[in-house]
Image (spheres, rainbow, N blue to C red):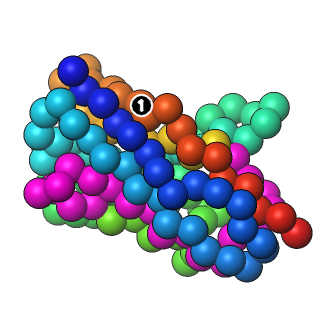
């Protein structure tokens, strides 16, 4: 059974940094996309960053470009999100996502809370 477990969330002051980590288990994810989404109170879940499975190409939402960096370790089945220069508007629950749309596969973690104080 596929399981995604996030860690690393917490409370940080504006301008600070956090590193989120997601550990995936249940199968090998070398050929899946791995990424992060977030959901703030009263808002819909939105895309943050994603990394492909072959070339390692990365994709970022405009609002995190230059501040967040996604990385993955296929040997460990992990995907991390380094978040720098955090802003209060980054406050949200952050979700790990692993998918392969052409295979009909889409998995979510339980989420980790990130709170940025001003």
Disc 1 target residue: 108
Q: Residue sitting at 27 percent across and 41 percent down?
A: 24
Q: Residue sitting at 65 percent across and 63 percent down?
A: 63
Q: Is 52 positioned to the left or the right of 96 in the image?
A: left
When the figure is inspected, residue 87 is found, relative to residue 10, above or below; the finding is below
Which segment did they paint magenta? 72-92
Which quadrant of the view contains residue 45? Answer: top right
Can residue 106 be seen here? The reply is yes
Which secondary structure lies at badge 1? strand
Q: Is residue 86 magenta?
A: yes
Which is more toward the observer, 102 or 24? Answer: 24
Which quadrant of the view contains residue 102? Answer: top left
x and y, in percent, of residue 79 in the image: 33, 55
Q: Residue sitting at 71 percent across and 61 percent down?
A: 11
Q: Is 104 positioned to the left or the right of 47 in the image?
A: left
Local packing at callout 1 (Cα closer than 10 Å; few below 14, some 14-19, many 20+) is some
């Amino acid at each position: 059974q596929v399981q995604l477990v996030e860690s690393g969330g917490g409370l940080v002051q504006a301008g600070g940094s956090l590193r989120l980590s997601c550990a995936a288990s249940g199968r090998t994810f070398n050929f899946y996309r791995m990424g992060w989404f977030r959901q703030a109170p009263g808002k819909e879940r939105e895309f943050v960053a994603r990394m492909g499975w072959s070339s390692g190409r990365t994709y970022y939402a405009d609002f995190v470009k230059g501040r967040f960096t996604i990385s993955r370790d296929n040997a460990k089945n992990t995907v991390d999100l380094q978040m720098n220069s955090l802003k209060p508007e980054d406050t949200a629950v952050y979700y790990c996502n692993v998918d392969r749309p052409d295979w009909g596969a889409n998995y979510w973690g339980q989420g980790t809370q990130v709170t940025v104080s001003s």
